[in-house]
Amino acid sequence: VSALLALQFNSARITYLSLFLLIFYSLKQGAFIADDLVIFSDEQAFLIGTFIIAFLAISKDRSMFSMHFFKMIIGMILCALLAWGWHVAINLLASLPPKKISDSLSLLLSLYVPIGVACIVVCIFSVWRSTGTDSTIAITLFIWLFGYYMPDQLPISVLFTLIGIAYIYSILAKSYHLAYRDELTGLSSRRALNTVALSLNKHYSLAMVDIDHFKHFNDTYGHDVGDQVLRLVAAKLVKVQGGGKVYRYG
C-alpha cells in the first residue's frame, strides 16, 4: 500500500524502500526460494539493507519512469556488492592468525564502521533537508537496526508494520502539503483559504495585500529575484498577531 501511494505522489525513495522491505520480509518467510538456496547470510542482508537506506537518504526523489530509475537500480546493486565485499573482507580477516591482525585493523573492518558511517550520513541529510521523507528514512534505519540487534524484542512483522504506517503518514502529510500549502512562500494556499472561509461566522476581517509594481520589478531584476521578494513579504506578513492567518491568494 505504501509503495503504491508513494508512486502516485512521486515519492520514489519511499517506493524503493517499501519494495525492498517487502522483498526482504518475503525472503525471510521463505516465500520465493528455499532456505538452502539463499545466497546472502543474515549479516550480509543486514549490511546490504543498511547501505541501501543510506544511499536513498543522500538521493533525491525522481520519477520512477525515467532514466533515473536505472541509476537508482545500479546504485542499489553497487550497495549490495559493497556490502558483500565488506563482509568477505571481515571473514577473511577472521580467518587470519590473531597475531597478524592489529586491533585497529580489526575494528576498521568490523560492522561498526559502515553502520556508524551510514547512521551519520542519514542523520546529516535528515536534519539538512528537514523533509518528511528524509525523517521517514531515518526512522527506517532506526527500526532496521533495532530489528537486527534486538530481534527478540518485537517480531519483524510488527517492526515492518510500524515502518509501513510511518510511510503512509509521510505520504498523506506530503499530499496535504501539496494541496494546502504554497510551495514558493510556504504560506497556506488559496484552497486552504476557501476551506476556512466556509467555517467563518458573520464577524471577521479580511485584508487583501498586493505588492506595488511587482511586474516591473520582475521585468527589471528577473523572476528569481522576484521569488525572493515574495518570500520576504510572506515572512513579514506571517508575523501578524491577534490570531490572524496569512494565505497566498495569487
Image: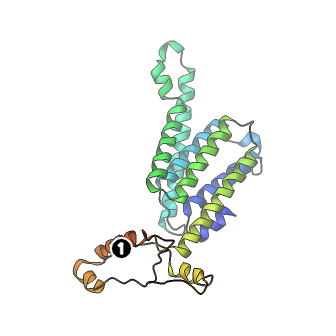
Residue at point 27% right, 86% down?
213
Under mark 1, the amino acid is Val
Tell me if residue 163 comes above or below residue 207 in the rendering: above
Image quadrant occupied by the C terminus: bottom left
Query: Which picture quadrant has residue 11?
Result: bottom right
Q: Is residue 149 placed above or below 26 in the rendered structure?
A: above
- Residue furthest toward the left? 220
Q: In the image, is 219 to the left or to the right of 73?
A: left
- Quadrant housing the N terminus: bottom right
Nearest the eye: 130 or 54? 130
* Residue 124 position within the rendered picture, expressed as x and y whole percent measured from the top left: 45, 47
- Of residue 54 and residue 124, the one placed in the foreground of this image is 124
Q: Residue furthest top?
A: 99
| Residue 218, image x, y percentages | 28, 81
In the rendered view, does 144 fall on the left or right side of 155?
Answer: left
In this view, the residue in front, 27 or 124, is: 124
Helix, strand or loop for disc 1: helix
